[in-house]
Image (cartoon, helix red, strand yellow):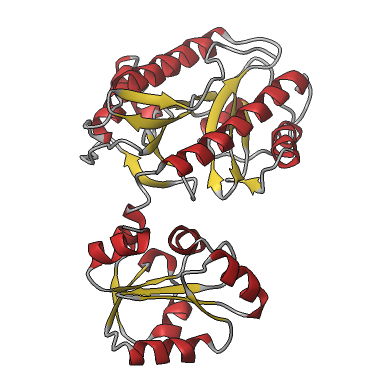
Amino acid sequence: MDRCERLLNETGHAVLITSDENCYYYSGFTGGDSFLLIADGYRGLFTDGRYTVQAKEEAPDFEVFDHDVINNLKKVVSDRKIEVAGFEEANMTVATMARFTGIFRMIPAGGKINALRKIKDASEIEKIAAAESLSEAAFNYFLENAKEGMTENEAASLIESYMRKNGARKPSFETIVASGVRGAMPHARAENIKIVPGIPVVCDFGCVLDNYCSDMTRTVFFSYADDKCKEIYNIVKKANLASLSVAKAGLTAGEVDKAARDIIEKAGYGKEFCHSLGHGVGLQVHEMPYARSKSDEILECGMTLTIEPGIYVPGFCGVRIEDLVIIEEKGVRNLNKITKDILIL
């Protein structure tokens, strides 16, 4: 059963797909500014003249409309007597929804549309592993070329330029290089300021390769490592290893989060671990499943999950260590090979 058939079985009615990621997942089309209509016995791709050739090549099982798409959609819906369509409510603006108003009754179905992407097939896992491998190579390049006195932007550029030069289409998110007190902000972006020696430098980055994302974090030091910072680093490392050791199919995402959180809380930094343990990675860098402290979602073989505990002490420093894993029956396949020992550059 193909992905479209599985989706129709889950929803029980036609589905309108508007996000680029799901257009690709369900049709193979990699262009933008397009949408799909998937119904019983019907597959339609609605785009414009910029993508005509590409759409027909990449989505041969879909009827392609490359002009007057709303009127063409109305005709398809009328001819096939489609009355109801699920849609991606989190991906649709009011202006976009207005285009489809009155064509059919629209029912929120984003959860079901996205849920089928949770379990990756062998081809997807291979692509994610390749993207992660490229990110690791970029980090090794950074380790070889980073120098005392460089700025966060310069450090980020070393990583990003390597990924692009070696095949990545783009970063999977804006690269984080956060040093000194800025490391205590989990999503601080690289700035044109010099890296602070002795204090942890959080490096969080990834790339998009063959449409799939990678995501990893390592925390390093420049010149030397402050003793208190080393203590915090080792707590985070212990938490990371604890979650890696318990994660497997059949466990809840919340239980995997708890393995790391218990260690950090016992060390007295519970309030400084201010985000969930991790998330899925695929066509998007953040997607299902999510490893939150109260999540009761059962992990299944083929899911991806980041394991990224952190401690963020305001006004002092931050440390995060992130691996990307594939959930397996008896454990995980860790796609990260970079050491977690303290690195001083």
* Residue shown at 30% from the left, 59% from the top: 111
Q: Please tell me which residue lies in front, 298 or 24.
A: 24
Observer-nearest of 291 and 274:
291
Left or right for 42, reference 148? left
Q: Nearer the viewer, residue 52 or 34?
A: 52
Q: How many marks?
A: 0
Q: Residue at x 28, y 67 (%)?
A: 8
Judge left or right: residue 64 versus residue 163.
left
From the top left corner, tell me how far across and down residue 67 is, in percent.
Answer: 58, 86
Task: Please state if 257 lies on the left or on the right of 65 as rendered.
Answer: left
Q: Is residue 326 above or below residue 246?
A: below
> Which quarter of the picture shows residue 151?
top right
Is 105 drawn above or below residue 111 in the view shown?
Answer: below
Quarter of the image where one finds residue 297: top left
User: Which quadrant, please, contains the N terminus?
Assistant: bottom left
Q: Nearer the viewer, residue 45 or 291?
A: 45
Q: Identify whether 223 is placed above or below 27.
A: above
| Residue 90 coordinates in the image, percent (x, y) | 39, 64
**Picture quarter containing residue 317?**
top right
The x and y percentages for residue 177 are 63, 33
Horizontal side of residue 146 vs 62, given as left or right: right
Residue at far top of view? 227
The quarter of the rendered structure image containing the C terminus is top right
> Residue 57, can we see it?
yes
Residue located 47% across and 92% down the image? 71
Q: Is residue 200 visible?
A: no
User: Residue 69 location in percent, x, y?
Assistant: 52, 85
